[in-house]
Image: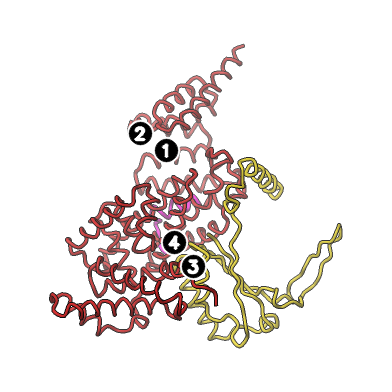
Chain colours: A red, B yellow
């Protein structure tokens, strides 16, 4: 038998810790106490397993060990507060963990505690990664680019908030469940985007967050298989992530979707993402916001070449998304799709409407899109103005450079035409 | 990281012996666990090598060889692709698999999929660029 490494035990821990914590939470009703017991079980494993090997049912081993520690604690203290006596009683009368029928439920309860709307979004994300992703505080801190002490405090505060508010260890039911699911999805998508927006950089820790988020999403899809939007979110993340490697060039410059080398797209993720999308579509009509976005990403994923893109389909999906969200940014994206499906003239009309409404006047992509459409329509002088305005609005230096380049190119072309 | 978990062929799998209902149930449960853990990206079982073919390359010749192939131990009967945090995690999941070939000694083999990042600092921007160009050409050829 090979030597049992620390890494092997850590791997078991990652697999087992959500179930272990969920199970312990059911008895302690206290996140801190549950985590302490789980940690003690982990320490015991680190001590014993290198000699004995990983037991056949490591989950049950960890659970039994944690419960015994709790009982030891109670016995040692002899006279303790009522709460603990009760705890000891519950623990000693509890059914063996490996026959507990509601293991999945325990994990799901943990999800709803970690993503409770009483917590700020960042705290929810951190707690979710820690309790359900099996990440250490240090790993979470590195992923979110904050010092470890800051992250530790954030987690402590979150746990205190949950304790003080006496957040119940329950899966909400009926209407309440429908109300709470979006806040869970939001947290998972936040984790994903944290990784996705950083993935162009040199740092490899943060793109790992995309994988953590996708994994959490898939776990949630297993726990809530009837919820269409959970599958929709999984599909959206996987289809977006399938382009991670294709969206920057050798020098780290971003590559636009239409210019990406599609052979570099991740076809395993596309396959899995399209299957999740199909499930989401089967489960619920009209489609929810995540599913609609996933369906748009799916149109791109299915197109072997940029020319093969189903732009009519994409416009129809944007129609539904505009109706659902009422977001002017979605309307702008729809205009781009309209330009591809019906030509820049029609799209310019839509963009000009948005300009008149004035809601996106500080959003550089409004003028950048307008410039692009004007250029395609041969209205170079107006296009120059639009690019200049967009360049003034963007906070991103690289983007500004690209916009100013496009303006300069138009100016040269104009000058050339005049000569 | 991504791994391929390969189920090695055995005498029975090569003979086309179908899995028992018991094994199908156990495997079904195991696959469900993998899905619920969020690590499963896909996988398939393979027909015995008697339904397969080989193409042997030697110099300029291309010889097509019909199955079955003799070296049972080197053949594969199926595979999964998993997205895991570490090789150790893949090992731990593989340990939990029901014996894939009851009544016979069998093996799972775990192999990490190649990713460009695996080359680490040895990959200069130029190498990456060459790789991109190559892939670009390939994709253009396959699109034609």
Q: What element carries label 2?
A: loop
Q: Are marks 4 and 1 in contact (CB under 8 Å)?
A: no
Quarter of the N terminus of chain A within the rendering: bottom right
Label 2 marks a residue whose chain is A
Q: Do labels 2 and 1 share a chain?
A: yes
The location of residue A280, given as percent across then percent down, is: 44, 61
The location of residue A365, given as percent across then percent down, is: 43, 34
Q: Name the residue under label 3.
A: B89
Label 3 marks a residue whose chain is B
Q: Is mark 1 on a helix, strand or loop?
A: helix
Q: Are marks 2 and 1 in contact (CB under 8 Å)?
A: yes
Residue at image x 50%, y 19%? A381
Q: Do labels 4 and 1 share a chain?
A: yes
Label 1 marks a residue whose chain is A
User: Badge 3 local density, few (<14 within 10 Å), some, or many (20+)?
Assistant: many
Q: Mark 4 points at which residue?
A: A215
| Of callouts 2 and 4, the N-terminal one | 4
Q: Name the residue under label 1.
A: A332
B10 lies above or below A298: below
Disc 3 to disc 2, C-alpha distance? 47 Å
Disc 2 to disc 1, C-alpha distance? 9 Å
Q: Are marks 1 and 3 on the same chain?
A: no
Residue at image x 68%, y 46%? B134
Quarter of the C terminus of chain A within the rendering: top right
Q: Give the range drawn in magenta.
A: A281-297
Question: Which of pointers 2 and 4 indicates the residue nearer the eye?
Answer: 4
The location of residue A171, given as percent across then percent down, is: 28, 68
| Of callouts 4 and 1, the N-terminal one | 4
């Amino acid at each position: 038998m090979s030597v049992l490494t620390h890494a092997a035990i850590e791997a078991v821990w990652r697999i087992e810790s959500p179930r272990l914590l969920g199970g312990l939470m059911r008895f302690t009703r206290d996140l801190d106490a549950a985590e302490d017991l789980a940690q003690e079980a982990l320490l015991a494993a680190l001590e014993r397993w290198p000699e004995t090997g990983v037991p056949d049912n490591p989950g049950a081993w960890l659970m039994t060990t944690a419960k015994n520690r709790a009982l030891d604690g109670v016995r040692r203290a002899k006279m303790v507060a009522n709460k603990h006596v009760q705890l000891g009683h519950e623990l000693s009368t509890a059914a063996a963990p490996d026959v507990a029928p509601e293991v999945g439920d325990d994990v799901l309860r943990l999800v709803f505690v970690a993503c409770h709307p009483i917590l700020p979004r960042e705290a929810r994300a951190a707690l979710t990664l820690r309790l359900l992703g099996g990440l250490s505080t240090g790993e979470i801190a590195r992923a979110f680019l904050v010092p470890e002490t800051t992250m530790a405090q954030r987690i402590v505060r979150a746990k205190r908030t949950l304790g003080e508010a006496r957040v119940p260890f329950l899966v909400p039911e009926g209407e309440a469940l429908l109300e709470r699911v979006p806040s869970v999805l939001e947290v998972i998508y936040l984790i994903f985007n944290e990784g996705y927006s950083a993935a162009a950089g040199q740092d490899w820790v943060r793109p790992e967050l995309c994988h953590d988020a996708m994994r959490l999403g898939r776990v949630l899809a297993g726990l809530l298989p009837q919820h269409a939007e959970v599958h929709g979110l999984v599909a959206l993340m996987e289809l977006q992530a399938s382009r991670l490697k294709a969206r920057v060039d050798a020098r780290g410059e971003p590559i636009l979707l239409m210019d990406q080398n599609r052979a570099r797209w991740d076809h395993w993720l596309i396959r899995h993402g399209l299957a999740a999308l199909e499930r989401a579509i089967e489960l619920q009509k009209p489609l929810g916001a995540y599913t609609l976005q996933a369906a748009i990403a799916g149109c791109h994923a299915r197109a072997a070449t940029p020319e093969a893109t189903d732009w009519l389909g994409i416009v129809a999906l944007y129609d539904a998304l505009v109706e659902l969200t009422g977001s002017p940014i979605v309307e702008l994206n729809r205009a781009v799709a309209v330009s591809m499906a019906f030509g820049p003239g029609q799209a310019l009309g839509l963009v000009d409407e948005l300009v008149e409404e004035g809601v996106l006047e500080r959003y550089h992509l409004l003028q950048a899109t307008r410039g692009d459409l004007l250029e395609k329509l041969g209205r170079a002088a107006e296009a120059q103005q639009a690019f200049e305005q967009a360049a003034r609005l963007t906070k991103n230096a690289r983007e500004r450079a690209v916009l100013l380049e496009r303006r300069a190119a138009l100016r040269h072309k104009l000058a050339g035409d005049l000569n | 990281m991504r791994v391929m978990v390969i189920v090695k062929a055995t005498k029975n799998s090569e003979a086309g012996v179908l899995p028992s209902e018991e094994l199908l149930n156990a495997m079904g449960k195991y696959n469900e666990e993998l899905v619920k853990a969020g690590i499963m990206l896909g996988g398939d079982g393979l027909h015995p090598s008697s339904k397969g073919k080989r193409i042997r390359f030697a110099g300029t010749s291309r010889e097509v060889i019909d199955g079955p192939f003799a070296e049972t131990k080197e053949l594969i009967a199926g595979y999964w692709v998993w997205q895991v945090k570490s090789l150790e995690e893949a090992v731990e999941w593989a340990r939990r698999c029901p014996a894939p070939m009851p009544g016979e000694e069998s093996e799972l083999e775990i192999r990490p999929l190649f990713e460009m990042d695996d080359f680490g600092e040895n990959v200069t921007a130029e190498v990456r660029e060459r790789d991109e160009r190559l892939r670009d050409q390939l994709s253009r050829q396959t699109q034609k």
